[in-house]
Amino acid sequence: MAGVSYALADFVTGGPILDLPVMEGASWASQLNRPDEVSCTVDMRDRDALALDLRSSTAPNKTVLLARNDDDVILAWGLISDDGRTWNEDAKTLSLSCQGVTSSYFGSFPIMPPAARTADLTVLDSEGFPIVNPALNTTLAGWSHGTIGKKLVEQALAWPGAPTAFVLPADEIGIREQTYLFSSFKPVGDALDDLSKQEHGPDFAFDAVRAPNGLSLQYVMRHGSEAAPRLGVDVGSWSLGENSPITGLDITDAVAAGATYGWMSSGRQDGAAIFSRYVDESALADGYPPRAVIDTSRSDVSVQATLDSYNAANMADARRAVRDLSFSVRGDATPALGAYRPGDRVTLTVPDGHPWHTGDIPIRIMSISGDETGKTVKIGCVILDA
């Protein structure tokens, strides 16, 4: 039977890894393009817990909390944040929680070069007026969207004292261009989310794995490519037939009527507001009334092509049928817990004569969650033929 254990590690160096004895009720969740979540409670009357010096070894903002299976595959992990450690005097327990690094670390790290530590923050323009030092802006051109995200992470990791355990992917040449103004203080995590939401934007993931030395962690960054922006591989199938490992299967269907018009506005570029319009009137021929998708959330976009890309992605989402699916699967089923992760594809095989389904169901896993037992795992996914 699959089991899940919990551990701690120093965030900056990745080690050492300390096994953590947890009480019943621990949980973990891994999600595609969203931060992982891990939470657990430790009985501080336990001798093994006392030996770990948890006052120092769980210090917020410098300690990794992780959940892993019996095969040492890390299922979810993140950085314990300011509010991620709670002492309960009555029960003598310590509760710990964390979120993935896109939120807990990169979610508050602004996009700016290390030179911002010492460079002049303002300079004088040609007419003698003070302006923000343009050398502190970050412009990335000639790369794929994924590599632009990688470069933002790489720049953040170039600051003194930054974590040394990250492993970044190779560069991918492309035609994408992004500029991030120093004055906007945009967090790296927000920029990664923005990149993934552009038209054909890539998935991003950060996987914690045991380092080659066996004593510490590495944090491996992955992203989709220009040719294949979606992360994930085919990992096998689960059956809906007799002795199925699946329970609690629910499918919610919605017709993809689509939107007719997409409207977006952004900030100002050279003193002029930026607008984007997208027209797709194909739904009108099917008898649907006109509908609009309006988005004014991209106030920091200063390039017309970037705003148009967000608009196209919004319209593509509006045209896509909503077919959300969730279920639980036994942790020891094949493929087993640890053999799949968010983004991977699984086929639900349907037996002949099923009263509802007419054929096998190809799905893409969007989230995985469970507890310390590993007996059953909650799967959130979308149907690929939607």
Image (tube, rainbow, N blue to C red):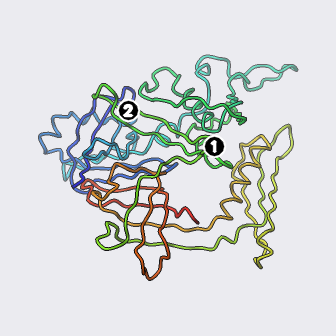
- The residue that mark 1 highlights is 227
Instruction: Compare residues 139 and 39 and report the one nearer the observer.
Output: 139
Tell me which residue sits at (57%, 64%) in the image.
385
Amino acid type of the residue tagged 1 in the rendering: Ala
Position of residue 168 measured from the top left corner of the image (x, y, whole percent): 50, 30
- Distance (Cα) linking label 1 and label 2: 37 Å
Tell me which residue sits at (13%, 45%) in the image.
45
Instruction: Compare residues 273 and 19 and report the one nearer the observer.
Output: 19
What crowding class fits label 1: few (fewer than 14 Cα within 10 Å), some (14-19), or many (20 or more)?
few
Position of residue 182 measured from the top left corner of the image (x, y, whole percent): 67, 30
Which element is circle 2 on? loop
Position of residue 350 measured from the top left corner of the image (x, y, whole percent): 42, 72
Tell me which residue sits at (74%, 24%) in the image.
134
Would residue 370 appear left or right of 171 to someone viewing this image? left
- The residue that mark 2 highlights is 62
Position of residue 107 measured from the top left corner of the image (x, y, whole percent): 52, 40
Would residue 335 appear left or right of 187 to someone viewing this image? left
The image quarter containing residue 386 is: bottom right
Which element is circle 1 on? loop
**In the rendered image of this protein, does residue 129 appear above or below residue 62?**
above
Count all numbered tags in the image, as a single digit: 2
**In the rendered image of this protein, does residue 182 appear above or below residue 67?**
above
Q: Earlier in the sequence, mark 1 or mark 2?
A: 2
